[in-house]
Image (cartoon, helix red, strand yellow):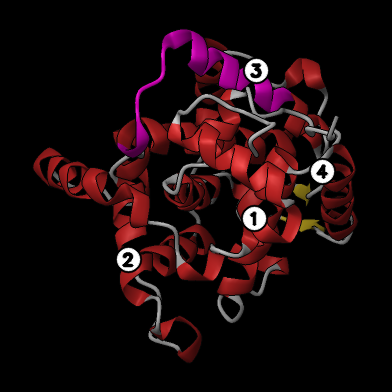
Amino acid sequence: MRDQGLLGPESVAWKVIGHPVSIVGGVRALIIQSLHPLAMAGVAQHSDYRNRSLDRLRRTAYYVTATTFGDTATAHAAAARVKHMHRRVRGTDPVTGQPYSADDPETKLWVHCVEWHGFLAAYRAYGGRLSAADRDRYVAEGVRIAALLDVPQDTVPASVAEMREYFEAVRPQLCVSEAAREAIDFVLHPPLTRELLAVQVPLRIVATAAVATIPRHLRQMAGIDRSRALDGITLAAVRPAAAALTLPLLRDAPSLVLGRETRAVAMAARAGAPVDRAAA
């Protein structure tokens, strides 16, 4: 039988992350991740996101696709590349004065939890319904993904309740630094550069959809809060068009790591159809 990877077609993650609205969850994660000063310091001092933002989106899309849908070797190879890049990301955070490192287990745990939960939040808002048991199962599946980057498994939330407790525990550490403010503004109002000009409309739609799913206390902290009425309008407008949300620049990401059989199975899982590997 074909290597089905770390999660496999029967996982909830294949359904959640395989849905086009996962791009909304990814952008949601970028905004929330910036509120942790140590994580943001690494981005501000070591990332060229302002000039190569599409490259960063593609790399992230590749990593998520490879670790979620790829076979075991592909998942571990993608993680190895990320860990290699992380070795040079270290320095001193100007906000707290604390040293930071992309290899720090607590920072990696923050990035994983925000991203993994972001996909779930976007799916629930725009993609479809999940039972409480499936939501817990999805969070538990993320433990295996976090372990790829050497995050201790006993520290990774394995249920919705544990994820909620984790976010409450980290909340006192969050703040809006100048670097975070600039990063959030970049996401919400992408500049009219040659690189981003052609994707201005989809980027802004995705960003607006992402903000509508962010908890109100975090939006207030970041200075991006808005009325509940506008949130309602956004939810009502995006849900019917959710299937078309995948940005053109990310459409080829799955084909980079998936074979024809796995792509077919992933599409069936995304659609909620019975998975027939023989037919695939």
Dot 4, how many residues are within 10 Å of its Cα: few (below 14), some (14-19), or many (20+)? many
- Please tell me which of labels 3 and 1 falls first in the chain: 3
Residue 36 vs 94, above or below: the answer is above
Q: Secondary structure at mark 4?
A: helix
Q: Position of residue 118 (x, y in %)?
A: 49, 38
Q: Main secondary structure of the magenta part?
A: helix
Q: Earlier in the sequence, mark 2 or mark 3?
A: 3
Residue 162 point in image, percent of width and height? 57, 13
Image position of 7 with respect to 137: above or below: below
For label 3, the SS is helix
What residue occupies the far left of the structure in this picture?
A: 229
Badge 1 is on which residue? Answer: 254
Residue drawn 65% across the image and 17% down it: 140
Q: Are marks 4 and 2 in contact (CB under 8 Å)?
A: no
Check disc 2 and report the residue beneath it.
Answer: 204
* Mark 4 lies on residue: 75
Q: Amino acid at mark 4?
A: Ala
- Residue 196, by quadrant, is bottom left
Secondary structure of the residue carrying tag 2 is helix
Q: Quadrant of the N terminus?
A: top right
Q: Which residue is mark 3?
A: 140
Q: Nearer the viewer, residue 121 or 137?
A: 137
The C terminus: image quadrant = top right
